[in-house]
Image (cartoon, grey):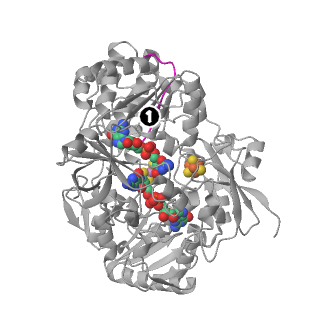
């Protein structure tokens, strides 16, 4: 055996932490994974999912050659083919489609399977050059981003480590234990110092164990709570007048609007007690550096952007953005250290193309576009004749699962999936291309949970014939006859092109920081002093006349005609559908359940552990009931993304989720659906 060494890397997944990793390797195999103690933010520990990343890298289920379908669509029957044959077949088919229907008949579908810059963004350059339909990648938290933007623009949130200065932590709609172990650890430390921790949720998520007090409210009503808190802050003179005068605009118009949002009114909407709303607001108003850990749950509703806007008003009213440890954990964009257009190449797009929304994939495959409320259909011209899926597993993660499957079953649809494993989506491919893992390629790390960036080099050579997204798109470009030099660069060259380009934020680094970054160490960005208000006029906007609603106000979410509100959220043991390949984690996670309140269960004769049917107009699924007081009456919760064969009738909760979009940002409304549940005899 050649000699073993520990190589620096970083977790590639869609998780705010982007933990620094060390991989023990001989260049061919990764033997062990360790947290990188030198990483300034994630120092010393990683989550349990990644402690055995080597089990994913060397999993016997890895797809290591291109595959061509031999059985019926979805049967999972394939035979190995060479890259040459695969590329010829794909390019021939695409050229025919382009000639007959035009390039927009080809649709890319991707999200954040690999989150690092090049792996995540390089497909955009290829599809821009191809002139394919564009994709609105809005399944996650774009409504939240837009909601912030409307109030604070790019004003940044705080690093988890800055929480050592916070004197109140409100975890708002985030399952912190699952989504960010480092944030969790900062919260635990703060608690030890006596800092109060409040959770605002729709159910007692694992994060409730961190909280001194948990407020449970019906899904989608957080805007009412936030506006009532704002009402109390104003009435009790708990606002920061100097900050408001210096750094905000529109308060003179907005504050009088708050009169109508009394705690009593909010109590009727949120089912919380008015006195609890008042005490929460007073606690917040009296804190010196309160931070809101801003999750995305409440933004995945029909009113998601407006709800975000209502909550974002609070730190602006108390001037928290000016205080170390104050403000929000959210709106963290370490990607500002790089010019992502060097990878995405918007200039490759020669003509305007139509945009399809990833949350409406099922409808798109069925041949129509949908209005935001999901009520109006318009035929798609040209229809979609081919889809190329990478960095994503839409059969398991997208809404309207039955429609997505029906679409992928279409005999006239040419489906290419670039994947590491035989996912539920890959099973529907005509051709599967083998993807590599982050241990096998170069990339640039730009986390969304803290301000630290890193360059990673491969720890091992690609396994089998697996190729990175970059190398795959370059090969596809060559097969299509694209001449641009861009597609002739190596992976290392494209990383260096991004790194070598001047960037204002990185220009503040010292020579040592630059050298550390080049050597593969994670390096923190040098941030400006607070308040670092990043709006066009340097002011936080309580009012914006360019918007449909110039001022934050309470609007309802979609809801629906069925009696139970269905909320989906993350699991500790998986990351969306990633890690479903790992039986150690899947076994620990257990079966897919719907958590429901005892009152709702009793009314339907359901006991804990019963198999029930859950249904709405979209689908009917069979699932285990988990009955407790952890969920409010009227709400049901499903944690985790499961594979179809881990469910009872080959469908998961995603079959019950609609394709409707949010009030702004055209994002998913994954947490805004209603269902009925009945016991199965
Ligand atoms: N272990 C693990 N880690 C993950 C993921 C995972 O699946 N597993 N997913 C990754 C991804 S893609 C993302 S985007 C982030 C997720 O990060 P976020 O989306 O910021 O956080 P979540 O914990 O998913 O937020 C969902 C929480 O919001 C709650 N919620 C839903 N609707 C409402 C509402 O109306 N009001 C309130 N107050 N709460 C509501 C849900 O009950 C749930 O607990 O985490 C990433 N990390
Ligand atoms: N029920 C339910 N549904 C949800 C959610 C939920 O909490 N509950 N969360 C929602 C959210 S917040 C999000 S962001 C989406 C996430 O949806 P996706 O981004 O689709 O996330 P994953 O399910 O993790 O699928 C990623 C796929 O990319 C593959 N992959 C990994 N690395 C690479 C690579 O380098 N190249 C290629 N070609 N492929 C790679 C992985 O093997 C995996 O199959 O899901 C949403 N859907
Ligand atoms: S999944 Fe998140 S917490 Fe776990 S190692 Fe990756 S970045 Fe860190
Ligand atoms: Mo997400």
Residue appearing at x 26%, y 70% in the figure: 366
Whether residue 536 is visible: no
- Residue 602 point in image, percent of width and height: 22, 42
- Count up the numbered dots: 1
Give left or right: position of 184 versus 72.
right
- Residue 244 point in image, percent of width and height: 42, 21
Ligand 1 found in image quarter:
top left
Residue appearing at x 28%, y 20% in the figure: 274
Give left or right: position of 6 versus 295.
right
Q: Quadrant of residue 222?
A: top left
Residue segment shown in magenta: 286-296
Give left or right: position of 297 versus 224.
right
Q: Quadrant of residue 629?
A: top left
Q: Which residue is mark 1?
A: 208
* Pick the front one: 589 or 539: 589
- Residue 647 point in image, percent of width and height: 36, 62
Q: Is residue 294 magenta?
A: yes
Give left or right: position of 479 versus 606.
right
55 shown above or below 606: below
Packing grade of label 1 (10 A; few <14, some 14-19, many >=20) is many
Q: Secondary structure at mark 1?
A: helix
Residue appearing at x 60%, y 73% in the figure: 466
Residue appearing at x 77%, y 48% in the figure: 515
Q: Outermost residue toward the left?
A: 561
438 shown above or below 525: below
Whether residue 641 is visible: yes
Q: Is residue 420 magenta?
A: no
């Amino acid at each position: 055996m050649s000699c073993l060494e520990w190589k620096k890397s970083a977790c590639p997944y869609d998780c705010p932490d982007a933990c620094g990793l060390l991989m023990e390797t001989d260049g061919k195999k990764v033997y062990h994974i360790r947290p990188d103690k030198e990483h300034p933010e994630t120092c010393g520990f990683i989550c349990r999912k990644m402690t055995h990343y080597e089990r994913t890298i060397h999993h016997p289920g890895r797809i290591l050659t291109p595959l061509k379908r031999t059985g019926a669509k979805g049967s999972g029957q394939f035979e190995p083919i060479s890259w040459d044959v695969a590329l010829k077949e794909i390019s021939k088919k695409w050229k025919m489609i382009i000639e007959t229907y035009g390039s927009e008949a080809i649709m890319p579908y991707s999200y954040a399977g690999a989150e690092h810059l090049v792996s995540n963004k390089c497909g955009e350059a290829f599809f821009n050059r191809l002139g394919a339909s564009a994709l609105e990648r809005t399944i996650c938290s774009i409504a939240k981003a837009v909601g912030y933007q409307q109030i604070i623009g790019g004003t940044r949130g705080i690093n988890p480590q800055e929480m050592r200065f916070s004197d109140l932590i409100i975890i708002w709609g985030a399952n912190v234990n699952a989504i960010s172990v480092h944030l969790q650890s900062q919260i635990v430390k703060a608690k030890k110092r006596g800092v109060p921790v409040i959770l605002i949720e729709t159910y007692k998520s694992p994060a409730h164990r961190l909280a001194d007090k948990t407020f449970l409210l019906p899904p989608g009503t957080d805007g009412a709570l936030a506006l009532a808190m704002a009402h109390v802050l104003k009435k009790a003179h708990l606002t920061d007048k100097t900050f408001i005068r210096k750094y905000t605009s529109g308060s003179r118009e907005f504050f009088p609007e708050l009169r109508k949002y009394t705690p009593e009114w909010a109590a009727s909407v949120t089912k919380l007690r008015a006195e609890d709303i008042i005490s929460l607001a007073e606690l917040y108003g009296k804190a010196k550096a309160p931070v809101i850990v801003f999750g995305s749950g409440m933004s995945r509703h029909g009113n998601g952007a407006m709800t975000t806007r209502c909550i974002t008003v609070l730190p602006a009213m108390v001037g928290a953005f000016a205080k170390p440890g104050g403000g929000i954990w959210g709106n963290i964009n370490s990607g500002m250290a790089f010019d992502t257009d060097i990878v995405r190449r918007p200039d490759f797009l020669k003509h305007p193309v139509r945009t399809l929304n990833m949350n409406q994939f099922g409808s798109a495959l069925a041949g129509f576009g949908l209005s935001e409320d999901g009520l109006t259909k318009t035929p798609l011209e040209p229809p979609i004749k081919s889809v190329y899926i990478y960095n994503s597993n839409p059969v398991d993660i997208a809404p309207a699962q039955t429609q997505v499957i029906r679409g992928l079953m279409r005999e006239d649809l040419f489906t290419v999936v670039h994947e590491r494993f035989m996912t539920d989506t890959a099973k529907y491919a005509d051709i599967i291309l083998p993807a590599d893992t982050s241990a096998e390629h170069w990339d640039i790390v730009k986390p969304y949970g803290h301000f630290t960036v890193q360059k990673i080099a491969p720890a091992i050579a690609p396994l089998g014939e697996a190729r990175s997204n970059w190398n795959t798109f370059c090969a596809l470009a060559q097969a299509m006859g694209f001449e641009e030099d861009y597609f002739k660069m190596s992976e290392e060259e494209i990383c260096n092109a991004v790194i070598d380009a001047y960037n204002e934020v990185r220009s503040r680094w010292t020579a040592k920081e630059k050298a550390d970054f080049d050597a593969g160490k994670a390096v923190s960005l040098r941030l400006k002093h607070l308040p670092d208000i990043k709006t066009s006029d340097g002011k936080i906007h309580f009012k914006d006349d360019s918007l449909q609603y110039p001022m934050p106000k309470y609007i309802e979410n979609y809801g629906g005609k069925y009696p139970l509100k269905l909320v989906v959220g993350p699991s500790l043991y998986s990351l969306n559908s990633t890690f479903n390949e790992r039986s150690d984690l899947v076994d620990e996670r257990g079966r897919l359940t719907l958590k429901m309140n005892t009152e709702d269960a009793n009314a339907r004769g359901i006991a804990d552990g019963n198999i029930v049917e859950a249904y709405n107009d979209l689908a009917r699924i069979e699932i285990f009931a988990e009955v407790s007081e952890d969920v409010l009456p009227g709400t049901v919760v499903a944690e985790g993304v499961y594979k179809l064969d881990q469910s009872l009738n080959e469908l998961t909760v995603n079959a019950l989720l609609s394709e409707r979009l949010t009030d702004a940002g055209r994002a998913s409304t994954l947490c805004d659906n209603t269902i009925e549940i009945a016991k199965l005899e």
